[in-house]
Amino acid sequence: MHPVLSTILKRLGLGIFTLFMVSIVIFSSISMLPGDFTQAVLGQSATTETVAAFRKELGLDRPAPIRYAEWVVSVLKGDLGTSFSGRSASGVDRSRPVVSLVAPRLWNTLFLAMVTALVAVPLSLILGITAALYRNSPYDRSVNATTLVTISMPEFFLAYILILVLASLWPIFPSLSTIDPKMDFAERLYRSALPAMTLTLVIVAHMMRMTRAAIINLIASPYVEMAKLKGASPFKVISYHILPNAWAPIATVIAFNLAYLVVGVVVVEVVFVYPGIGQLMVDSVTSRDIPVVQACALIFAATYITLNLIADIIGIISNPRLLHPR
Amino acid sequence: MAENLSNSTNSEELYSAVGEVGAVRRRRSLAERSWIVLKKAPPTAWFGMIVFFCYMFVALFAPWLAPFGEAEIFPVPFAPWDETHVFGTDQIGRDILSRLIYGARNTMGIALLTTLLSFLIGGALGLIAAIDRGLVDQVLGRAMDVLMAIPSLIFALMLLSIFGSTVTSLIIIIAVLDSTRVFRLTRSVAVGVVVMDYVEVARLRGEGLGWVMRREILPNVMPPLIAEFGLRFCFVFLTIAALSFLGLGIQPPTADWGSMVRENANLIQFAAYDIKAALTPLLPATTIALLTIAVNFMVDWFLHHTSGIKDE
């Protein structure tokens, strides 16, 4: 078999195994609940019967491997269980299926993440490449200093500075990103401008620094010096000689940062009251609504693992040494 | 050293090479050596150190520095900046300056405790894995891979929803999640040291696992671990700040910078009328950012110094 193919298959297998293990960890979180949690959900006045019925519904009376198998099958079918909220001590059940809570918000979060990625990735590539080209120039130094500052700041600090400047002092953008499905695309974009800007600032810093480092590493290598000596233009040196070897680390860092978006989105959504999955997760953690938390954690973890997997595969495919085996 | 030389030559009033070579060489004391290293530190490192020691000072002497108590409530909520309340009061009338000062103690103390715990767990497991190189290493490595596959903030949120948001569970959860990174680093550094002859000698003469870990390997993997400690401290500090900001970390009335940002965030809306009030929620956020930047500068310089890399 072609070495690229076998390496990719190996990596895919590892990714699926990781996803499997992660699903077990997330699943078993419900078994780790302390004994009094039924009271936290159903209220202090819950009778023994309602508690027993609730435990039976959760399946805590049956062996874990069987419950796990059932859970995986239903998740694959798109059924994530029912929320804890809306239950009461009297046994009246007004709870909603988790899917109906998660699905519309997931779409909102994906929209925000995509807008951010579309701005941040080209921007950081351009900044990184130009900073590496004009290394140690005032331009490079100022870009570097700015990114070092933004990288050290908590996301909510950046978010509030943007609100202060762009929403409060000069009201250009709305400080609350309320979004509903009836809005058209331009209105959505306008409302999610500030959260997207915050996320962009956070991830551009990291991506730009890594791109710069990857290219500077290569500039020092003998073959690039050779290309310069034979008179290739700086543009040709970059595009023809350096970039093919730099794609692997750059792609890895891009995918890694898109995966980081998954985490950054939680805090930023809370700041701007953006109706996304991150805010849903925080709210559910506060109310200890475990099925919703599990669903959100599963979605976040799956996205994270998939993006890292893609990064590795791009790294493998773009490695010239693996592509042309001897 | 310089004084030492001048003393030895003063007696003869003449420079004598024989005298210099013949004089007993005194080893520089730790303070002298540190000063020589510090003199060469770049301004960014000095900035980092000064900021860090200011923070430590404030954290240690909080009760004497703060004008009011941590949870002392005054009649006027959201009071403007004036002489009594330098930075005003918060949403239920607590003095912001006092809470900022106490926050240094709480936030940094909890972050430091968490980082220490995560290094204890991750470092010990990493050394054991590096020494073992067999089944234990494999099992630990795979387990850590799985833990690292879930973003730590998401994992922490999930665990907090199960165990509830108390300071104890916060410290343990974040320490365990963070120890995966420490494990990785310790193992990869220690693997190179374990194969050294002196480790082999120690094991042949019958030293136990604890001795080999502590006396043979640990001293030789210290520099990267110390640098990592600084970076992990920043990371833990930011994670705790983010969790507190989300209302899931350190709970009120304990003063904490992350939750202070959240509690006073609404004031930003009034920036056009009272810019000082609008800056109030940014104060705790600035203290968080400043500490992170300071520690990053210190770690940068430390790594640069210990690795012996000269400028590009």
Image: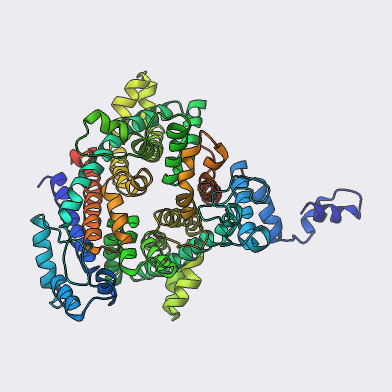
Q: Depth check: A143 or A265 in front?
A: A265
* Left or right for A97, reference B70: left
In the image, residue B265 sits, relative to residue B241, either above or below, namely above
Is residue A148 in sight in this rendering? no
Report how many numbered discs are placed on residues in the image: 0
* Left or right for B44, reference A41: right
Is residue B128 in sight in this rendering? yes
Q: Depth check: B88 or B293 in front?
A: B88
Residue positioned most to the front: B75
* Left or right for A105, reference B280: left
In the image, residue B165 sits, relative to residue A123, either above or below, namely below
Q: Residue at x 17, y 73 (%)?
A: A54
- Picture coordinates of residue A280 (x, y %)? 27, 52
Quadrant that contains the C terminus of chain A: top left
- Picture coordinates of residue A267 (x, y %)? 37, 48
Q: Depth check: A179 or A63 in front?
A: A179
The colour scheme applied to this rendered structure is rainbow
- Picture coordinates of residue B195 (x, y %)? 39, 65
- Picture coordinates of residue A35 (x, y %)? 27, 77
